[in-house]
């Protein structure tokens, strides 16, 4: 460290030596990855749209707006955003309820709020950002790893918008929101034994359901085969019980 640096505080030295991206609180590798992904998607869009410059310019404008929004949001302190996240979550859920009650229907789905002559927007898109931020805000005020009751509250916070979005229906967005919230919960220190317990119960229920269903269809098929004079299924035992065909059928 030179003599000039000795006259400055350590914070001033770090600020003075920081790059432009660091001053803007932007992660360089992440920015490069986003720009590469955007460029590749624009190339694919240009090719798939029959070399439509209008569609390409429209999508590039959307990318530009998103990039500027990312830079602007990055300038806010995390504590400032943490104060507004719960309010944003409540507003987002209320907007999803409005969509469910009186949303705009298009192409068989009710996903939009339409204000005639002003704007038409999709509230579920905001929840993609608000959901992981909400879970992070909630867990940041609790001891980690989270206790069972805190996991339950987190699952409720995730499940409420998930169900509302599934009802639209919009399975893709609902799964993204579910994954976003669950990922934060997992990174917060969710115990593996809880995850494995849920997985074991889910797999066990699935196997039990399909086992009962399989036995039913197999017995039914055998009875039908006996009546028709073909007691042995042609696909037995390799075939699936509910898809077995009998010798001589058709």
Image: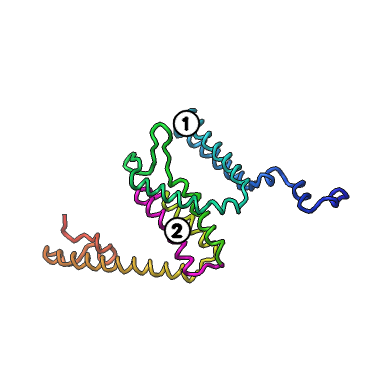
**How is the model colour-coded?**
rainbow
> According to the image, label 1 marks what residue?
55
Task: Tell me if residue 204 comes above or below residue 1 in the rendering.
Answer: below
User: In the rendered picture of this protein, how many numbered marks are placed on residues?
Assistant: 2
Residue 157 badge: 2
Residue 170 inside the magenta-drawn segment: yes
User: Magenta stretch?
Assistant: 143-172
Q: Is residue 45 left or right of residue 244?
A: right
Tell me the crowding category of disc 2: few under 14, some 14 to 19, or many 20 or more residues within 10 angstroms, Cα based: some
Q: Main secondary structure of the magenta part?
A: helix
Name the quadrant of the C terminus.
bottom left
Question: Which residue lies at the image location 51% right of the left edge and 61% below the top edge?
Answer: 185
Q: Nearer the viewer, residue 59 or 139?
A: 139
Q: Position of residue 212 (x, y in %)?
A: 26, 68
Numbered disc in front, either 2 or 1: 2
Pointers 2 and 1 in contact (C-beta within 8 Å)? no
Q: What element does badge 2 sit on?
A: helix
Separation of residues labelled 2 and 1 (CA atoms):
37 Å
- Helix, strand or loop status at disc 1: helix
Side of 58 relative to 228 (left or right): right
């Amino acid at each position: 460290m030179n003599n000039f640096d000795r006259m400055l505080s350590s914070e001033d030295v770090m600020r003075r030596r920081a790059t432009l991206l660091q001053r803007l609180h932007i992660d360089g590798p992440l920015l490069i990855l986003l720009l590469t992904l955007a460029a590749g998607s624009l190339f694919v869009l240009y090719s798939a749209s029959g070399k439509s410059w209008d569609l390409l310019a429209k999508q590039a404008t959307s990318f530009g707006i998103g990039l500027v929004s990312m830079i602007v949001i990055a300038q806010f302190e995390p504590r400032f955003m943490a104060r507004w996240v719960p309010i944003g979550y409540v507003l987002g859920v209320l907007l999803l309820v409005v969509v469910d009650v009186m949303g705009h229907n298009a192409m068989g789905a009710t996903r939009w709020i339409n204000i005639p002559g002003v704007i038409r927007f999709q509230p579920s898109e905001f929840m993609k950002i608000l959901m992981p931020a909400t879970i992070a805000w909630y867990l940041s005020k609790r001891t980690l790893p989270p206790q069972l009751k805190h996991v339950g509250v987190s699952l409720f916070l995730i499940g409420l918008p998930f169900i509302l979005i599934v009802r639209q229906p919009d399975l893709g967005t609902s799964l993204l929101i579910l994954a976003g919230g669950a990922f934060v919960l997992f990174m917060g220190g969710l115990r593996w034994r809880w995850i494995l317990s849920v997985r074991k119960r889910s797999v066990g229920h699935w196997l039990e359901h399909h086992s009962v269903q399989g036995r039913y269809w197999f017995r039914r098929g055998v009875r039908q085969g006996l009546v028709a004079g073909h007691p042995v299924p042609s696909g037995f035992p390799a075939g699936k019980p509910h898809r077995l065909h009998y010798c001589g059928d058709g």
